[in-house]
Amino acid sequence: MERSLTLIALFAALIAALGLVPKFDLAFGVPITAQSMGVMLCGTVLGAKRGGSAALLFVGLVALGLPLLAGARGGLGVFASPTAGFVIGFPIAAFVTGLAMQQFRALPIGWAAGVAAILGGVVVLYAFGIGGLMIMLNKGLLEASGLVLAFVPGDLIKAVLAGFITAGLAKARPASLLSRS
């Protein structure tokens, strides 16, 4: 149990640390941050329960006011912003990523992690994010979806990176990949 708690706290810290990585702009001017890759890695490395718990701990710390989101944002005001759906979706995205990783045992680890990261860290996270945009900005589904479309290439790159990182971790320390145990 102590190991699980330590890993949950460590991966919540990883999500926070990735929020400190300076953003970079894609060729067409869309800023990309690394924070959602932390959510993907929670699921691909820790599995559904531990990964979801790590992301939930992170969201709880943000709610308490710690400025852990990219751009040094935190506090309850985050949950009334247009990006609230993404923040609320972090734990579910990590859980679904971990669940998918556990189900894709027939695939090589890198492929399984990449596909799982796309399912949880892109599809599920965007479902929550678009829902949040619809509510907070009073937009329709197509309009809210259009607002996030430019971010999809960057998140697909992060999912591929999560696949490579997870595969590298599995090769270096096979016992550390709890999503496959």
Image: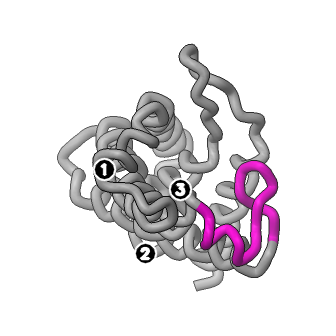
Kindly identify the amino acid type of the residue bearing the numbered disc 3. Answer: Val
Residue placed most toward the observer, 85 or 105: 85
Of circles 2 and 1, the one toward us is 1
- Residue in the image at 42% along x and 51% along y: 121
- Residue in the image at 53% along x and 43% along y: 169
Going from N to C along the chain, the mark reached first, 3 or 2, is: 3
Of the 4 image quadrants, the one containing the N terminus is bottom right
Horizontal side of 41 relative to 76 (left or right) equals left
Q: CA distance from mark 3 to mark 2?
A: 13 Å
Residue at the extreme left: 106
122 in relation to 128, above or below: above
Of circles 3 and 2, the one toward us is 3
Kindly identify the amino acid type of the residue bearing the numbered disc 2. Answer: Lys
Residue with the mark numbered 3: 39
Give SS at disc 2. helix
Residue 20 visible somewhere in the drawing: yes
Kindly identify the amino acid type of the residue bearing the numbered disc 1. Answer: Leu
Q: Which image quadrant is residue 25 in? A: top right
Residue placed most toward the observer, 13 or 130: 130
Going from N to C along the chain, the mark reached first, 2 or 1, is: 2
Residue with the mark numbered 1: 119
Residue with the mark numbered 2: 49
Q: 10 Å neighbourhood of mark 2: few (<14), some, or many (≥20)? A: some
- Residue in the image at 41% along x and 69% along y: 92
Q: CA distance from mark 2 to mark 1?
A: 16 Å
Magenta residues, start to end: 66-81
Give SS at disc 3. helix
Q: CA distance from mark 1 to mark 3?
A: 12 Å
Horizontal and vertical percent position of residue 179: 40, 61
Residue 79 is covered by the magenta coloring: yes
